Image (cartoon, coloured by chain):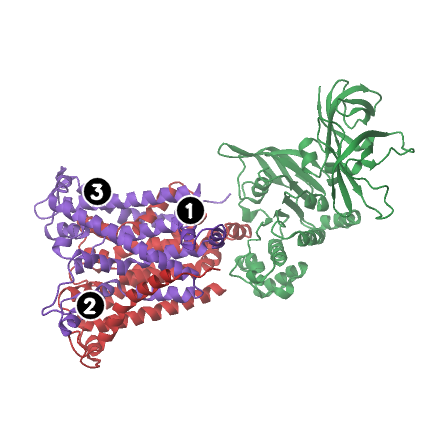
Chain colours: A red, B purple, C green
Amino acid sequence: MSKPGKFSFGVFVFVTLFLHIPLAILVISSFNSSKSMRWEGFSLKWYHELFYNSGPLWHSFWNSIIVAISSSVVATVIGTLGAIGLCWYSFRMKKAIQTLTFFPVILPEIIIGVSILIFFNKIGLSLSLFTIFLAHVTFNIPFVLMTVMARLEEFDFSIVEAAYDLGATEIDMLLRVILPISMPGIIAGLLLAITLSLEDFVITFFVAGPGSSTLPLHIFSMIRFGVSPTINALSVVIIVGTALLALSSKNLYSSLLKR
Amino acid sequence: MRKNYGPIYVGPVAFWLCAFLSVPLLITLSYSFLAKGLYGGVEPHFSLAAYRSLFNTAVLKVLLNTIIIAVLSTALMVGLALPTAYYIARSSQKNLLLMLIIIPFWTNFLIRIYAWITILGSNGLLNSFLMGVGLTDGPIQFLYNRGAIILVIVYTTIPFAIFPLYSTIEKFDFSLIEAAMDLGASKTKALWKIMIPNIRSGITTAVLFTFIPTFGNFAVPKLVGGTSSWMLGNLIERELNITRNWPLASSMSVVLTFVTMLAVLFFMRSQNKKEL
Amino acid sequence: MRQTGAAFHQQRVDSVKSSQVTVENVSKSFGDFSALKNASLTIAKGGFYSMLGPSGCGKTTLLRIIGGFETPTEGDVCFDGVSILPLPPNKRQVNTIFQNYALFPHLTVFENVAFPLRLKKIAAAEIKRAVQENLELVRMETESKKYPSQLSGGQKQRVAIARALINQPRVLLLDEPLSALDAKLRQHMLLELDAIHDKVGITFIYVTHDQAEALSVSDQVCVLNKGEIQQIGSPAEIYESPANEFVARFIGETNYIHGTIAAVTDNEHALFDSPDYGNFTIYLDKKVQQGSKVALTVRPEKIRVAPEKPDNLPPDVNVLHGVVEDMIYTGFQTKYFIRVSKDKEPLIVFRQHVQYFMDEKPISWKDKVCLWWNTKDSFMVEVSK
């Protein structure tokens, strides 16, 4: 087999460095005792600042957690049921519903943010953590749906027919066959939804009310109004946190698949 | 014969997406054809004023800037991603190299933008360095222009080009390249004439996945762009939250949706052609 | 062996709860496509009944109607004279073996077989006993802790059978159950299915596109094509006296000779006149009149071939002469393509190699040969006036 050439190797190295160097700089400067970019000695003071002196940041962090968990649980329930229906049943309007589920994935986030804001305004719903929850469920549903559907498509519809043939009612079938076999997909979908919700800035930006800041909104205002190196420390915590989460969920997922 | 439970399963999805997606989009569409209210909102009579305002030179300038940024960033991303994905797909350490690309992607989107601010900002690393070695006296403004926007968009979005390209190149049968070389083609020529046409679906996916989020980008120009380098997203936000001209914000959203749909249709057509 | 098996079987049938299945004028259409046209058949209590035909012939549709997965557009299906159409599949006392086994991937072999009993909330000890018994029936008792992904194709098949039988259905439906297995395993499983059928004594309805499978195990075979029943009969009837050209061609290889009835000589014989093959006597398996246009079918193994016409041929044979155009040697036999008529396809003839060195004189390409067959070995498949 022919090996890739020098050119592609060069571009690969360039892209990898390009992706990593800015983050490496963030990590290094989080340990810098100076407020500027000039190195003035090792210090953990920004971490201290982050953990003991950043009340509003932690408040918005907990908001993010509340929204992420509630919205992804709701999106997982709705998305899983939808995936079962779309994968294994046929009925009127199926194509239309299928197309509708692609919209939140394809449309630029700002469109969803703007239109849902206009909608909340129209029906007179004042912006709060609840409106963020509604918006997050909306954009999370398709991602859960696709993940669960990918799992269901590995199986043939005949196992549903077999269950029915052997005497199962619809509820038996759901609880004893469909949910157990799609569990890896459901868990993957849930984790994906949590990540997307924790990560979302643009849509949340439009539907957040006063006092309902989430972590990304708080980071945004930190960047815009007064950069403090605390954000460097926060970045490192987030990088490490996501890496740990991603690795453990990957392990969890593959152990589920092994069965 | 048993009952068809399909509608029961799909009911919640259909209800939720109709209520919180279709209806909002339709309301936005209808707002774009109404007159603007005095303090935000709309007056309930038909008007094309919002669409006429789209042809203001100020709006057209922003639109042009958006197109330039989207086209340049997409070209840059696909251009860089193609050799990168090729290298990963041909390597014996595929998973490791893929992880190298994925790990930075796990970091929060805003923090990835912020990383560039710490480098390019007036108190940033680059200016500290330049002033330290005495190349300049005062800080140079690297941020808040079109170049900075393109740089940061490429930085935050390029994995969306690498992944689809990687997965198609990985499936490509490289014995075809050997066959072409056996028949007298140079390696470069073989890659260009044989591999590129066969990974077209990956290339169109990469273009779609980078063009759409770039064209509708809002956060990047908001944080590293200046008033002179605004994109459509910034204009929509201003009309919505500051100027409070909701019909105009709606009409611009309609344009953005329209461009997105065009891109998707183009994509689906090119995918269908491939299947024939 | 089947004969004695059948006698033993009949005794079992009377003691086991098994059903006679009748299908009355059943039609099924999907939109404009008519998958099944006015099908009627009766399946004996405890029988092994095959439905045979190419893909899309309607056999699976008929099976799914009996199983309760499709509703017929017209007609009725009865078990022992009582319509089952109003019943959902889980109330029909019929179970299905699916083409790809449809084992639940998240359950062990034991739990797969126990599944129907768990649904009925039967006591654990009773479940254990019943599952054990059924796993022994299919010789899978040692694999009960494995998951389906750890089993071979044949083992999955056995688990599927054990699972389908645990509800003690009166009828078992088998939808191409062997198609996912390789050829050797297929034959083995076929014998095993036959043995299981003898043991449990319930009605088996077996759907397949493979004629060898259908002929080897069934009591009755129903041949379908394009949604219509072509012929119902015992395997030998289907093979030896096909009702029409489709059945003759679908089951085994055959030769066709077209011609007209020149004269009906007596109750059993007629003089046949073929423009391509000449005149000869045929046996009348159907009533025909003088002047009818007729197609004869002769199976290739019924035709004998020799370099020269033997002297001692019996009187009731038909003799033709031809030239070997092509031959395929397959070890135990050789298949000859012998050109008799310039305008027609060559006739196909099988010659078994009973003894390698002692075989009659070798026959090779371009050789002139003599062909003959017993008049009783040809059948009329298409008769028109």
- Assign a secondary structure to mark 1: helix
| B159 to A96, vertically: above or below | below
Given the image, on which type of amino acid does mark 2 rest? Ile
Residue at the (32%, 50%) spot, across then down: B207
Question: To which residue does mark 1 refer?
Answer: B6
Pointer 3 and pointer 2 on the same chain: yes
- Assign a secondary structure to mark 3: helix
Expressed as whole percent of the image width and height from the top left, the position of residue C53 reads: 63, 39
| C150 to C68, vertically: above or below | below
Check disc 1: other Cα within 10 Å, few if <14, some if 14-19, many if 20+. many
Q: Which mark is residue C111?
A: none
Chain to which the residue tagged by mark 1 belongs: B
Check disc 2: other Cα within 10 Å, few if <14, some if 14-19, many if 20+. many
How far is disc 3 from disc 2 in space, using C-alphas?
Answer: 41 Å
Q: Who comes first in sequence, dot 3 or dot 2?
A: 3
Chain to which the residue tagged by mark 2 belongs: B
In front of the other: A187 or C342? C342
Farthest residue in the right direction? C312
Residue at the (44%, 46%) spot, across then down: A89
In front of the other: B123 or B26? B123
How far is disc 3 from disc 1 in space, using C-alphas?
Answer: 31 Å
Pointer 3 and pointer 1 on the same chain: yes
| Residue A188 as seen in the image, left or right of residue A203 | right
Given the image, on which type of amino acid does mark 1 rest? Gly
Given the image, on which type of amino acid does mark 3 rest? Leu
Question: To which residue does mark 3 refer?
Answer: B29
Q: Which of the 4 quarters of the picture holds residue A95?
A: top left
Question: To which residue does mark 2 refer?
Answer: B119
Residue at the (81%, 26%) spot, across then down: C282
